[in-house]
Amino acid sequence: MTAARKEEQAPRDDSFREVNVTAHDLPLHCPQPGSPLWARHPRVFLDVLKNEEGKAVCPYCGTTYTFTGERPKGHH
């Protein structure tokens, strides 16, 4: 069995579907480094500071990112 075939049959861990991020993670993009190969898609930048809730949803995989902590002041 090839490695790619094993990857397809591996159980998917959807626990990453909600991710808390901080100012250190900005500018935010999805997928994040270290994402499993099956979760890879074209990189998309997300603006979690755009709304008061501090949330953004990836249009490809549906992962919800929530900004926590102090918002940066000025440009980042």
Image: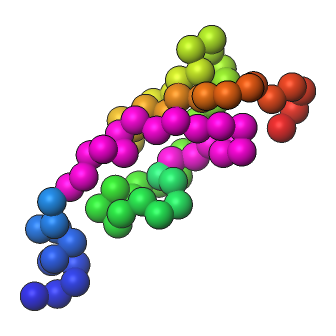
The percent position of residue 32, horizontal first and vertical second, equals 51, 54
Q: Check residue 70 for magenta coloring.
A: no
What residue lies at 16% left-to-right and 77% top-to-bottom? 6
What residue lies at 71% left-to-right and 45% top-to-bottom? 24
**Foreground residue, 2 or 70?**
70
Q: Is residue 27 visible?
A: no
Figure check: 49 above or below 33: above
What residue lies at 63% left-to-right and 11% top-to-bottom? 52
Image quadrant occupied by the C terminus: top right
Q: How is the image coloured?
A: rainbow
Name of the residue lying farthest toward the front = 69
Figure check: 23 above or below 10: above
Figure check: 57 above or below 16: above
Q: Is residue 7 visible?
A: yes
Image quadrant occupied by the N terminus: bottom left
Q: Which residues are magenta?
A: 12-30
Name of the residue lying farthest toward the top = 52
Q: Answer left or right for 53 relative to 12.
A: right
Q: How many marks?
A: 0
Figure check: 37 above or below 4: above
Name of the residue lying farthest toward the right = 74
Q: Check residue 26 for magenta coloring.
A: yes
The percent position of residue 61, horizontal first and vertical second, equals 35, 42
